[in-house]
Structure formats: C-alpha cells, structure tokens
Amino acid sequence: MSDERTRFANVVLPHLGDAYALARWLARNDSDAEDIVQEACLRAFRGIGGFGDINARGWVLSIVRNTAYTWLKRHRDPKFVAVDNVEEVEQAGADASLDWGSAPASPEAALIEQADAARLEAAIAELPIEFRETLVLREVEGLDYRTIAEITGVPIGTVMSRLARARRRLMVQLGKDEK
C-alpha cells in the first residue's frame, strides 16, 4: 500500500493544478470542479498500479476529462446550461490580467484589459464542450496535439479540426461583441 501511495504522490499530485483547471473549464463551476477532481483522484489512486511509464500529466488529465463527463452526466440535467455570474467572470478577468505580466500603463488600460479578459473567458465558456476542452488543453494547458488526442480519444486530425473551429468561433464571437 505504501508503494501505491508514493507512486500516486509522484504521478498525480504534481498535476492537481492542471486537473482542477481542466475540470473548472469543463464544469464551469468551482465546487463542481472540486468534486470532479476529488473523484478523479480516487479513480487515479485505484488505477495507479496499472500506470505505465507514460506521460503522467496526460494520464491524469485523461482521467479528469472522463470523470468530468461521467460526473456531469450524473449530476446535471442535459438541458441545463450553466451561466457564470457576470461579476464572477469580470473578477476572473481581473485576476487573469494580473497574472499576465506587467501592469497596465493607466487605469483606463487596466479596465480595457479586464474587460478583454472577461470577454474572452465568456466566449470560451460558450463554446461547445468538445471545442472548449480542446482549446483549453492546447492554449491553457499547453499540451501538444498527440497528447490531446490521447486524452480525448480522437485522432490528431480531429484535434486540429476542433482547435481550428474553436478559434474561428472565438473570433466570430469576439467580433460580435465589438459591434
């Protein structure tokens, strides 16, 4: 049992932040994402004996993805569409702009950056889940196409297609917002 715990600590725990980020994007809700990650960790612990020396991050994110779909199917009405609180989105945009590096030149620039970040996050949240997960895995998590294909269980061509479509939809949505 001790070997399994050590292996779990070495394989899964370093990727909990990424696991939560993916669960958050898929569930669109902090508390649901926490539940999903907790359940995914239980699954990972049960399966740690079968973990081969493959990409640990990809393995963990694959478990999180599968757990998220199972959890959402079990706990949410398929007709229900979660819409985040506008204030929460704006705050997330403000937090994201703080993480992006240098401080804006003026208060006006800070407001513009916050609004842009909030618009982008809202546009990503509106994407169909297969596009949203592909975009998040590539652009937020920085995974390569092959790893995304392994996690999502689709061919690399499908990953590339979904990514292109997600980007195109984002451009259209963000273009509508400017008008």
Image (cartoon, rainbow, N blue to C red):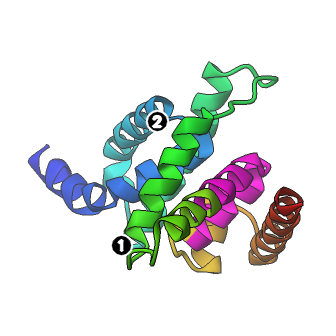
Residue 152 visible in the shown view: no
In this rendered view, identify the residue nearer to me: 141 or 102: 102
Q: Secondary structure at mark 2?
A: helix
In this rendered view, identify the residue nearer to me: 98 or 79: 98
Tag 1: Cα neighbours inside 10 Å, few (<14), some, or many (≥20)? few
Please tell me which residue is depicted at 88% across the width and 65% down the height of the picture: 172
Q: CA distance from mark 1 to mark 2?
A: 31 Å
**Residue 24 position in % (x across, y down):** 51, 44
**Residue 67 position in % (x across, y down):** 54, 39
Magenta extent:
117-139
Residue underneath mark 2: 30
Please tell me which residue is depicted at 40% across the width and 35% down the height of the picture: 34
Tag 2: Cα neighbours inside 10 Å, few (<14), some, or many (≥20)? some
The C terminus is located in which quarter?
A: bottom right
Please tell me which residue is depicted at 67% across the width and 60% down the height of the picture: 120
From this view, report whether residue 157 is shown above or below residue 113: below
Magenta span dominant secondary structure:
helix
Assess whether residue 136 is covered by the magenta stretch. yes
Name the residue type under label 2: Asp
Name the residue type under label 1: Asp
Residue underneath mark 1: 53
In this rendered view, identify the residue nearer to me: 115 or 131: 115
The N terminus is located in which quarter?
A: top left
Q: Nearer the viewer, mark 1 or mark 2?
A: 2
